[in-house]
Image (spheres, coloured by chain):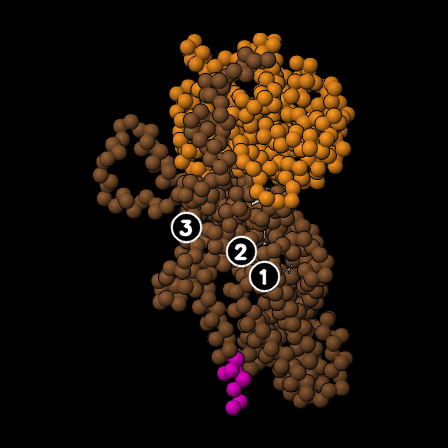
Amino acid sequence: MAEAIKVPTMAEYMAQGKSPEVLFWVGCAGSFDDRAKKITKAFVKLLAKAGVDFAVLGTEESCTGDPAKRAGNEFLFQMQAVTNIEVLNAYDVKKIVTACPHCFNTIANEYPGLGGNYEVLHHTQFLKTLIKEERLTVEGGKFKGKRITFHDPCYLARANRIYEAPRELLEKLEVELVEMKRCKTKGFCCGAGGAQMFKEPEPGTKDVNIARTEEALETKSEVIAAACPFCNTMMTDGVKNKEKEDAVAVMDIAEMIASAEDL
Amino acid sequence: MQYLPNILFVIALAAGVGFFVFNIKKLIRNIKLGRDEDRTDNKAQRFKNMAKIALGQYKMVVRPVSGIIHVLVYLGFIIINLEVLEIIIDGIFGTHRIFSFLGGFYDFLIAVFEIFALLVLVGVIIFWIRRNILHIKRFLNREMKGWPKLDANLILYFEVVLMLLFLTMNAADLTLQTKGAEHYASAEGIVGAFPVSQFIAPFFENLSIPTLIVIERAAWWIHILGILVFLNYLYYSKHLHILLAFPNTYFARLKPQGQFDNLEAVTNEVKLMMDPEADPYAMPEEGAEDEVPAKFGASEATDLSWAQLLNAYTCTECGRCTSECPANQTGKKLSPRRIMMATRDRIEDIGKNIDANKGTFKEDGKQLLDDYISREELWACTTCNACVEACPVGINPLSIIMDMRQYLVMEQSAAPTDLNNAMTNIENNAAPWPFNQMDRANWISEN
Ligand code: HEM
Ligand code: SF4
Ligand code: SF4
């Protein structure tokens, strides 16, 4: 990174005989997808600013298996899960934070049955705690008073009932939050879940991400706030398809906070 | 001959209840064709869900118009059934309004029944208008053509006729009491209060007592026979929900919606593969073979669990799931309601097949996959859980979709090509994209 923030790996911590406060689970999108890497970097900047003692698995991390499981390949899923759990348990990991709701859901709900028991937090929950503990301060800055809508990721809001944490962060940014007509546990999918991200959609009249983008655009917001790298891609594509990319930005909440703080 | 009506009534009652019990037994047999699944944990939470969602109609009122009208019809039904108890006792013993000894309280009860009968009538008429005149989208999907549409309307006609008969019967009874007819009139004056049927009674004023008795008896008989017929209609209809909503909400899944069950059979195999100590050629222990399932996932209704089959029989075909489904709302073939209806159709066909072949299933060249539910439908699902969230009776259409996908992928390797590529990538480089795992931390040094 430009500012050369140090991102230590678990292996490095282990070599020093130490363990970090929290493991940052980056996820496949966060590691490889160009758009999602920006979210990863923004979140890392916030972690560094708050002085959080964190580490990543680096090359020892592998796909949680979420897309395999939801495609129906339980076998591949469990292979991935068992491999990851072995690594995590070997490092005696207790607490995990991730910016991906799919990784979050899989590790929090589906790993315990296979021997992986950790405290798992979505990055919006973790950031909220950092602010509450006054380790991180957030002021409105450039988003103050701006019309912003939030797209709830299915695997966060509906699947795990987490919809307040991201909204509390937006509140801290002093934005004017405009809800879409379907939100929170009744939110409308971006179209990426269930491994749809990795295949062509079935024949239909419209793509799901276009339908959701239309709902978001109806709010006349300047920013569509997201909290999932896959939703982010889907909504970004939707906005481009509607030729609105000059008027409307799609940003992860971590990016919004980092940019408000001029990090 | 004096007791002929009583005898006929008892025969009708026994036949009606008997056939109902026969059908319920068949229903339970069919549900038990499903695979075993433990849904007995956490009883307190289960009772709470049943009380809230079925008894309390908690999720119905999310859609205020149909929800509130349904609450009226539902309450009306339960309350008016108290009166059916009196009707049955009167029928067996030839008495007239056996509970009238309750005095003022009886008047109150009858008044309440009448008011609810009127409310049910109004509610059902609004339901009919919503279905047949207002073009409400969720009633118009392709799976609602033919029998499902007729079924929905028949239920409403049934209710209208029953309520009208109930009120007609009361109006004739009131007139007979007023005229002092034998058997009807009581020394205590008029028994029962008739806030609704008193407005029908004036039409009967000029009729003779024998004519009135014919009207009263006819209404009484058709009403109670109608109820018995309706009771037996349930098994063939989405109206079965009035019974099954209760067990279905009790047995509904309690885990977070995002948590999909880990297949135990797969866990065992994976453990074996990962364990360097394991001897792959070891003889299986005695009986161990039975534990390995014949197949992964579901291609047939009987591969589903009993809880999923109970779901299918409970479905009210309301389409709240489908109207929230992102795939369906963007024109894909998938409709979670249709998944439930197709599952019910298939398990019914299997049940009928078993009945026709003296208790054993005879291969009929069909299965749930392809013949009832297409692959195109299964692959359109985003696993978003919107259908699960929307269902007011605790049904999980997504779990059936997932089980069938598991069959397609693990038994048939029949995933769409793009997905196969993604899965090969996960297998080879631990990410759904073709990147090397060794490059996973490159973002740290990139700018
Ligand atoms: C026990 C007495 C009940 C009666 C007499 C009853 C009656 C009815 C009727 C007449 C309809 C058809 C409405 C239409 O045509 O649109 C209906 C639909 C429905 N009922 Fe019931 N019901 C009962 C119990 C329940 C229970 C316990 C539940 C659980 C919450 C339930 C859930 C539903 C649902 C979801 C629909 C579809 C209606 C819609 O939203 O379109 N019912 N019911
Ligand atoms: S989980 Fe699947 S079937 Fe259910 S609403 Fe979402 S896309 Fe539709
Ligand atoms: S599954 Fe539930 S929401 Fe869908 S049609 Fe059946 S009862 Fe209605």
Where residue B318 sits: x, y (%)? 61, 55
Dot 1: what SS? helix
Q: Main secondary structure of the magenta part?
A: helix
Instruction: Kindly check if marks 1 and 3 are in contact, taking CB atoms under 8 A apart as contact.
Output: no
**According to the image, label 2 marks what residue?**
B341
Q: Check if mark 3 and mark 2 are on a common chain.
A: yes
Label drawn at residue B303: 3
Q: Please give the range of residues in magenta.
A: B1-10
Q: Check if mark 1 and mark 2 are on a common chain.
A: yes
Colour of the chain lettered A: orange
Closest to the observer: B31 or A40? A40
Tell me the kind of residue under disc 2.
Met
Where residue B204 sits: x, y (%)? 74, 82
Tell me the kind of residue under disc 3.
Asp
Circle 2: is it few (<14), some (14-19), or many (20+) Cα within 10 Å? many
Instruction: Kindly check if marks 1 and 2 are in contact, taking CB atoms under 8 A apart as contact.
Output: yes
The brown-tinted chain is B
> Which quarter of the rendered picture does the C terminus of chain B lie within?
top right
